[in-house]
């Protein structure tokens, strides 16, 4: 029994780490969705760009801190470029056009990464060793806790409290919340659209960079489809949780990451082949019963059922 | 008057497809594959358009109906004596029967339509992002089952030795059939009612249109046409894996539709042909092509260029190349006038 208990605790700790990372990604998606009504599918490729920065930095022999700094610089710059060149011209368009445009950007960034890696390396991926020491484990009470899990949890808590303070206590935070509730009215009352949106994109970029560091630490081989699958799962989690509000979206992201972690660890592979089907069937069920999101409470702000 | 309008709207895209088929027939066998792929893409994108274009609801699920159709047509046309070797775990009913090319296309369409109808019954209550994610879940489930269940197909392996019956003729005719049905549908009162719900759901409901029923009809029709297109696809390539009809094709076909102009048949056809054309031209350029000078691009440029063009078209012209309108001569005239004054 103790063996199973230990395995379970181990499993839970790993799942908690994955949940924290997915929760952070959900915050990044939710922030931009709040002010822009845009699901940024290319968010995963921002993370990929950060991972590649780390990988190339470790090839160039930079120290860990230099590499992480470079990662933040690249990801934030790329987010702002994306906002100016893609989001801004499409701001008034239908959600479908904006979503497909971010697909195109995501596809473009992936192909560039593939081209660069193939050209430079002659192989599909490159290892990133600069943050690898984060993957080492420390043993706490018989459970191996990888440092990245602790860092992920700390980063998630710090980021969420920082964000809560920013949104709750500052003027610009108030403006962001107002814009997320009713953008037109907020603008009428003097909220600067560009300022609010740029800030949201910037914050999402900072979070993407942090996620890039965390994900690279746990899967140190960087390929062009890095974070793509994680992004899709987080997106599902965000919508299931309730994309309309930041906290429900975050909770959705955390929940799906945690669930995935627990299930992956608990089931042997030959038993889990139909698991994706079961999970996605559950997703459909939740969406039909609660289209506004699992955690959205009683209010239904958007007409989502016909 | 009605008929001349129908003719003037359906004839140009049909003519374009016929021209692509005829020009393609005159090229070398290796080049012909590119043309066939483009024509099959037309069928896939037009099938997607029937739902997404007319309803304005984004669906990521249509490729799963193409996958179901493709697998049904593929598994049923592999000769019985070959199935024992390549698909040992197949259920007896599927193992002991083989059907011809045309029945397999119809079977695929039927499978696609039935599956789509079953999915649509609960899902079409949703709209917006919830609908998008729910259809995405359908794609994931379909892929998962096709990838694992060896009683109905090759599972994670390759479905091979499928008769390659989609030549230039079948690809052209197949695309034309899908287009004709799509156009016929959008001219019926069902099609018009659905388009009304796209423009203003509240107003449409106020005049007594059932959004749910109209979306259900379009989703089912689109599923049937997708199944048919999937069958064309498997008969063109001669083999199939679950990953071929999955995420990448879903995104690519949606991008083709939006790049062309999502709200018109003309846009769907133009988008499919333009993106496939660009893709195969760049594919050639990667192995060296002579266009006055020799163009030789490094491997991987193709994807970058296709992605860049898609992003550029969407940013500069969000309503697509055609502006989401059907082909019309007055539109051409206006365009010319604008150019003259500009």
Image: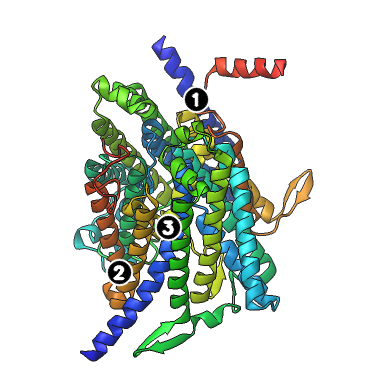
Q: Element under label 1?
A: loop
Chain of the residue that carries numbered disc 3 in the rendered image: A
Q: Element under label 3?
A: helix
Which residue position holds label 2?
Answer: A273
Q: Of marks 3 and 2, which one's residue comes earlier in the chain?
A: 3
* Residue at image point 79% right, 43% down: B292
Q: How far separated are the C-alphas under marks 3 and 2?
A: 26 Å
Chain of the residue that carries numbered disc 2 in the rendered image: A
* Residue at image point 62% right, 19% down: B335
x then y, percent, for residue B100: 31, 47
Which residue position holds label 1?
Answer: B325
Q: Would residue A288 be found to the left or right of residue B8 on screen?
A: left
* Residue at image point 26% right, 49% down: A297
Q: Are marks 3 and 2 on the same chain?
A: yes
x then y, percent, for residue A31: 46, 51
Q: Is residue A39 visible?
A: no
Which residue position holds label 3?
Answer: A26
């Amino acid at each position: 029994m103790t063996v199973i208990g230990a395995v379970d605790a181990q499993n839970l700790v790993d799942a908690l780490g994955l949940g924290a990372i997915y929760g952070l990604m959900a915050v990044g998606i939710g922030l931009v969705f709040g002010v822009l009504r845009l699901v940024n599918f290319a968010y995963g490729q921002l993370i990929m760009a950060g991972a590649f920065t780390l990988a190339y930095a470790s090839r160039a022999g930079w120290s860990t801190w230099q590499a992480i700094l470079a990662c933040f610089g690249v990801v934030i710059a790329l987010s702002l470029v994306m906002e100016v060149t893609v989001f801004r011209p499409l701001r008034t368009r239908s959600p479908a056009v904006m979503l497909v445009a971010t697909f195109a950007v995501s596809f473009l960034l992936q192909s560039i990464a593939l081209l660069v890696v193939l050209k430079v390396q002659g192989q599909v991926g490159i290892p990133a060793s600069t943050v690898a020491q984060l993957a080492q484990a420390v043993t706490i009470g018989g459970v191996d806790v990888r440092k990245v899990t602790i860092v992920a949890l700390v980063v998630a808590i710090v980021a969420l409290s920082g964000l809560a303070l920013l949104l709750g206590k500052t003027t610009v935070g108030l403006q962001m919340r107002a814009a997320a509730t009713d953008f037109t009215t907020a603008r009428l009352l003097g909220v600067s659209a560009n300022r609010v949106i740029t800030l949201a994109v910037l914050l999402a970029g900072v979070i993407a960079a942090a996620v890039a560091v965390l994900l690279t630490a746990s899967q140190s081989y960087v390929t062009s489809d890095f974070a793509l699958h994680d992004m899709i799962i987080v997106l599902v989690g965000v919508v299931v949780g309730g994309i309309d509000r930041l906290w429900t979206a975050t909770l959705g992201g955390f929940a799906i990451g945690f669930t995935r972690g627990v299930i992956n660890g608990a089931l042997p592979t030959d038993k889990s082949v139909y698991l994706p089907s079961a999970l996605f069937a559950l997703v459909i069920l939740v969406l039909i019963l609660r289209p506004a999101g699992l955690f959205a409470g009683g209010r239904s702000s958007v007409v989502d059922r016909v | 008057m009605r008929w001349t309008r129908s003719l003037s709207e359906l004839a140009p895209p049909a003519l374009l497809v016929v021209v692509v088929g005829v020009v393609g027939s005159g090229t070398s066998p290796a080049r012909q594959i590119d043309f066939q792929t483009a024509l099959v893409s037309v069928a896939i994108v037009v099938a997607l358009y029937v739902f997404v274009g007319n309803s304005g609801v984004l669906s990521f699920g249509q490729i799963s109906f193409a996958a179901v159709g493709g697998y049904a047509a593929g598994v049923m046309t592999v000769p019985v004596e070959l199935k024992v070797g390549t698909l040992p775990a197949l259920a007896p009913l599927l193992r002991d029967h083989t059907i011809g090319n045309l029945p397999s296309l119809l079977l695929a369409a039927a499978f696609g339509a039935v599956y789509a109808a079953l999915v649509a019954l609960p899902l079409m209550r949703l709209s917006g992002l919830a609908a998008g994610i729910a259809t995405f879940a359908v794609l994931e489930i379909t892929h998962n089952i096709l990838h694992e269940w060896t009683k109905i197909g090759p599972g994670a392996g390759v479905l091979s030795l499928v008769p390659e019956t989609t030549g230039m003729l079948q690809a052209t005719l197949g695309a034309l059939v899908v287009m004709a049905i799509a156009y016929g549908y959008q001219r019926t009162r069902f099609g018009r009612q659905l388009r009304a719900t796209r423009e203003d759901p509240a107003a449409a409901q106020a005049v007594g249109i059932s959004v749910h029923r109209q979306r259900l009809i379009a989703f089912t029709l689109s599923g049937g046409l997708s199944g048919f297109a999937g069958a064309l696809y498997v008969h063109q390539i001669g083999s199939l894996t679950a990953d071929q009809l999955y995420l990448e094709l879903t995104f690519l076909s949606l991008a083709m539709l939006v790049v062309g102009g999502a709200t018109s048949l003309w846009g769907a056809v133009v988008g499919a042909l333009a993106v496939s054309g660009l893709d195969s031209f760049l594919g050639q350029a990667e192995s060296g092509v002579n266009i006055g000078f020799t163009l030789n691009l490094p491997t991987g440029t193709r994807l970058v260029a296709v992605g860049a063009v898609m992003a550029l078209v969407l940013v500069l012209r969000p309503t697509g190349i055609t502006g989401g309108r059907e082909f019309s001569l007055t539109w051409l005239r206006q365009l010319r006038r604008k150019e003259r004054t500009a």
